Image (cartoon, helix red, strand yellow):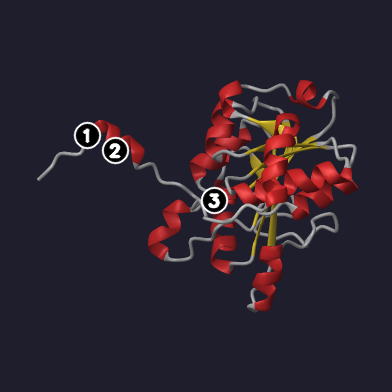
């Protein structure tokens, strides 16, 4: 029987996402070529200074997994006084967001096309985020896949370092079991408090747009659960 090398062991890191195949349109390709140099951020450039990146001092909202980018675009358009950073590994989604943000003339969006865990490790300064958003992540609904869910105790503590005191982690899902998992993990996490009170879910805020994944969940008869946890220390 072959012995697994240390290198192969390292390569088998559990990921919380699957990099989906998808065709990039001509407009998206053009945006990836022409707009990326302005709005794109890369891990290889290391730790960032958000004030320098955006050319101003403003609250920073970071969203993990923005999909096709429509809801992030809407938030950035409606809240020009905030700086928005999106992370997404799906190239068509990145291209669509860049294209639409450029078309609307938005200057308060920046994008990483990288694994969020690595972005947090290498690029996001401690105590720099006012809000972290995770809307409708892959639920990994089969029990044997629950270990792949991004919301885990270690993740809660890694992102707590990046939030400012008083900043908060906002999650949303249309899978009740994942909502319960999120509530359990975050309620037990040191240094957080539930903004709605112990064990309470949040009404969907008016400023959170309805996403494509939410609409799909609602068509399937799923409920919608929002959770907001504030960093206390």
Q: Position of residue 207 (x, y in %)?
A: 84, 54
Q: Quadrant of the N terminus?
A: top left
Left or right of 189, for residue 81: right
Nearest to the observer: residue 107 or residue 226: 107
Q: Are marks 2 and 3 in contact (CB under 8 Å)?
A: no
Numbered label attached to residue 129: none
Left or right of 177, for residue 57: right
Q: Are marks 2 and 1 in contact (CB under 8 Å)?
A: yes
Nearest to the observer: residue 119 or residue 177: 119
Residue 164 visible to an observer of this rendering: no
The residue that disc 2 covers is 9
Left or right of 150, for residue 144: left
Which secondary structure lies at badge 1? loop
Q: Residue furthest left?
A: 1
Residue 31 in which image quadrant: top right
Dot 2 or dot 3: first in sequence order is 2
Residue drawn at x 82%, y 49% is 75
The residue that disc 3 covers is 185
Q: Position of residue 53 (x, y in %)?
A: 76, 25
Dot 3 or dot 1: first in sequence order is 1
Mark toward the viewer: 2 or 3: 2
The residue that disc 1 covers is 5
Which secondary structure lies at badge 3? helix
**Rendered view: 200 above or below 38:** below
Q: Position of residue 24 (x, y in %)?
A: 62, 52
Check disc 2: other Cα within 10 Å, few if <14, some if 14-19, many if 20+: few
Nearest to the observer: residue 211 or residue 33: 33
Q: Position of residue 7 (x, y in %)?
A: 29, 32
Which secondary structure lies at badge 2? helix
Q: Quadrant of the C terminus?
A: top right
């Amino acid at each position: 029987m072959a012995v697994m090398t240390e290198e192969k062991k390292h390569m088998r890191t559990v990921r919380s996402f699957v990099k989906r195949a998808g065709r990039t349109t001509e407009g998206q390709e053009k945006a990836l070529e022409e707009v990326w140099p302005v709005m794109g951020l890369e891990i290889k450039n290391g730790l960032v200074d958000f004030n320098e990146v955006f050319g101003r001092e403003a609250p920073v909202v970071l969203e993990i997994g923005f999909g096709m980018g429509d809801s992030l675009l809407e938030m950035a358009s409606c809240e020009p006084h905030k700086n928005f950073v999106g992370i997404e590994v799906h190239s068509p989604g990145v291209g669509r967001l860049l294209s639409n943000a450029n078309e609307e003339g938005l200057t308060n969006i920046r994008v990483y096309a990288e694994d969020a865990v690595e972005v947090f490790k290498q690029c996001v300064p401690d105590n720099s985020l006012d809000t972290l958003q995770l809307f409708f992540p892959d639920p990994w609904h089969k029990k044997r896949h629950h270990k792949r869910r991004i919301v885990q105790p270690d993740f809660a503590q890694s992102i707590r370092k990046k939030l400012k005191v008083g900043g908060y982690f906002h999650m949303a899902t249309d899978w009740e079991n994942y909502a319960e998992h999120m509530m359990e993990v975050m309620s037990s996490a040191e240094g957080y408090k539930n903004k709605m009170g112990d064990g309470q879910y949040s009404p969907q805020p008016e400023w959170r747009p309805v996403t494509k994944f939410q609409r799909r969940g609602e068509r399937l008869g799923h409920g919608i659960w929002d959770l907001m946890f504030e960093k206390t220390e």
